[in-house]
Every structure is written in C-alpha cells, then in structure tokens.
Amino acid sequence: MYCWAQNTYWVPIDHEIPEDIAERETRQISYYQWVPFFLLIEAFLYYIPCLMWRLMSDKSGIRLNDIVQSATEKENIEPDFRTKTIESLSRHIEAALKYQHAATSRTNYTLHRVFKCFNMRYYESYVTGLYLATKVMYVMNILANLVLVNKFLETDDYSIYGFGVLKDLLVGRSWMDSGNFPRVTLCDFEVRVLGNNQRHSVQCVLVINIFNEKIFILVWLWFSFLFVAA
C-alpha cells in the first residue's frame, strides 16, 4: 500500500537502478492513482457542450425536442394523424416566430440596443448559430482531451499517444521496452534502524496498469471517432 500511495518508478529490466535519487524521481510514475478522477473530469468536460445546448436551445421559444419527438412518432404513418402533426408543428413554429418578432419589437432598453448580443435568442439564426457553436465546442473539447491524455500519462516518447501505442502494437514493442503502463516497477522506502534511516528498493506489481492501458487506448480511439463524426 505504501508503494501504491507513494509514486513508483520504472527502470528497464536490463538496466541498472540509478544510484542518484534525483534521477529516480525523474522516472516516477504518478498517474495510476488518479485515473478514476481523470476519467470523471474528462466525462464532465465532454458533457459541457451538451449541457449548454440543453440550457440554451429552448430560449428561442422553439422546443426542438418536442418537434423532433412529434415528427418521429410511428403514428405518423397514418395520413390523418400525420396531417394533425404537421398542423400542430406549424402552429408551434408560427407562435415561436411571432414571439421572436414581438420580443425584438419591444426591446427598447438602451443596453439591448447597444449590445446586440442580448437579443441573440430572438434572432431567426439563433438555433443555427447555437448548433454550430456546440459542434465547435465538441471538436475543441476532443482536441483538449487528447492533449490532456498525453500530459496526464507523461508520454514524452509519443507526440500523439494513440498513434504511438498503435505503432508499438504493430511492430510488437511491449511495455518492457516502451515503459508505457509498466506492470513491474520499483519503489524506494526508508526504514529507521537504531536512529539511522536506511533506504531500500523493492519491486512492485501494478496489475491495474493492465486495465489502464486498455482503457486509455479505447478512450483515445473513441475520441478520434468522435472527432471525425463531429
């Protein structure tokens, strides 16, 4: 448990353990304890554009979710029901447009006239602009998350983590050569004996890195797919 809480460090099995303590510290692996929190933060960051869309999409008076739900109901295959749905949707859109026109007509406040951004939700292009802004936020979010993965995993060998791992898999390079998600690491601890501190080095087994490796490569592939889809 001590080695789990205090960062371990990795040295290739065919290399000697450095005598210099400072050099050992530069080899430390400090991410594995924080993986669950990092994934939660990534999930929250990726939820922000969705939250913004849900909070702001109805501000124009057009209830997009209701419109889509009504338009996709299976009962619309019946001509009479489809006609009623079309009439209902047209009335809703007409009412929303009248609301926007009335709202822009009565905005006589000087602040609203000077700062047009306060009236954005009343413009016809509000929903379109919000949709495009949400898409841009998703793309920027994906790029930011990919950079965060690189920084979090301290992958100095790879400029882009996922491409580097896939390349390693293709050429048959294992973690024992690359040092990514090592299963066996080293841990230093001090024991006080007769008033003197004696430093010991022991091997530690990080079984969790077997799962971390798969989790992060799947996360990276998923982000890459979302980047293309977005």
Image (tube, helix red, strand yellow):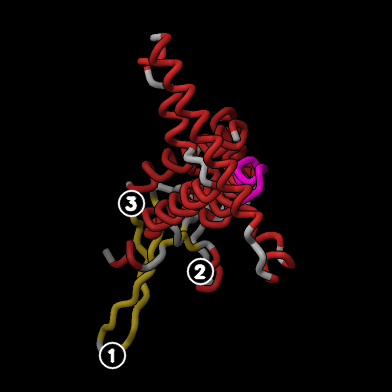
Q: Amino acid at mark 3?
A: Val
Q: In the depicted view, which residue is nearer to us: 109 or 174?
A: 109
Disc 2 to disc 3, C-alpha distance: 18 Å
Q: Amino acid at mark 2?
A: Glu
The residue carrying mark 1 is 195
Disc 1 to disc 3, C-alpha distance: 30 Å
> Could you tell me which residue is drawn at 25 percent across and 88 percent down?
194
> Could you tell me which residue is drawn at 52 percent across and 29 percent down?
90
Residue 25 - label: 2
- Residue situated furthest right in the rendering: 114
The residue carrying mark 3 is 205
Residue 12 position, x and y percent, is 50, 51
Q: Is residue 116 left or right of residue 148?
A: right
Which of the 4 quarters of the picture holds residue 160? Answer: top right
Marks 1, 3: nearer the viewer: 3
- Residue situated furthest bottom in the rendering: 195
Disc 1 to disc 2, C-alpha distance: 25 Å
